[in-house]
């Protein structure tokens, strides 16, 4: 596992990171920009769980919410801090969508990530830090994620918007 560094790599507005996974979240496709940002070779990525790039600053409850959203057949939008192989990191605005075959059987997930607005990251980063701190206060993983998710839910409710509406508003 890579060491974590305080050095951020920033996406350019025209960068689009694309990946596909199977239904279990193992990478089946990654574009050149994903390979570049992650710092892994394509062979190191294919077949690996997508969480190979998970940064420890990401609250587990955000991923739980993402998976719940996807399992309901809905697309997920969210801000994600990813870790590079060399320990650097980069922020993305992720859009993850379930992918189905002609018989409506889940094939996997398709994800497109783009450069987030800096103002959105400045708002989201302290929120995620509070969520991580809350997660560390509980011995039960379920209680930790429930308490952390409540912080996210309160943040969304205070905005007066639905979750996806708030995320997309932060980008405008």
Image: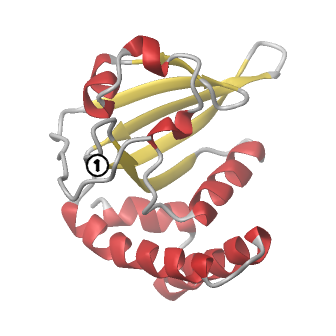
Residue at horizontal 69 percent and vertical 76 percent from the top: 144
Q: Nearer the viewer, residue 61 or 40?
A: 40
Q: Position of residue 11 (x, y in %)?
A: 19, 42
Q: Which of the 4 quarters of the picture holds residue 122?
A: bottom left
Residue at horizontal 40 percent and vertical 14 percent from the top: 42
* Residue 158 versus residue 106 in the image, above or below: below
Q: Position of residue 162 (x, y in %)?
A: 57, 70
* Residue 9 versus residue 129 in the image, above or below: above
Q: Which residue is mark 1?
A: 89
Residue at horizontal 53 percent and vertical 65 percent from the top: 59
Q: Which of the 4 quarters of the picture holds residue 100?
A: top right
Quadrant of the image containing the N terminus = top left
Q: Position of residue 62 (x, y in %)?
A: 57, 61
Q: Position of residue 125 (x, y in %)?
A: 35, 71
Residue at horizontal 67 percent and vertical 45 percent from the top: 74
State left or right for residue 45 relative to residue 7.
Answer: right
């Amino acid at each position: 596992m890579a060491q974590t560094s305080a050095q951020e790599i920033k996406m350019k507005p025209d960068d689009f990171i694309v990946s596909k996974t199977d239904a279990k979240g193992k990478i089946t496709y990654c574009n050149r920009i994903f390979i570049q940002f992650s710092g892994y070779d394509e062979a190191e990525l294919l077949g690996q769980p997508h969480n190979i790039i998970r940064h420890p600053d990401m609250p587990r409850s955000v991923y739980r919410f993402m998976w719940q959203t996807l399992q309901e057949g809905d697309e997920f939008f969210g801000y994600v801090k990813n870790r590079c192989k060399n320990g650097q990191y980069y922020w993305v605005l992720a859009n993850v969508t379930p992918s189905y075959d002609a018989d409506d059987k889940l094939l996997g997930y398709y994800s497109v990530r783009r450069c987030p607005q800096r103002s959105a990251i400045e708002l989201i980063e302290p929120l995620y830090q509070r969520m991580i701190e809350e997660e560390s206060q509980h011995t039960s993983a379920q209680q930790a994620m429930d308490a952390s998710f409540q912080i996210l839910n309160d943040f969304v409710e205070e905005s007066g918007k639905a979750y996806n509406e708030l995320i997309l508003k932060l980008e405008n």
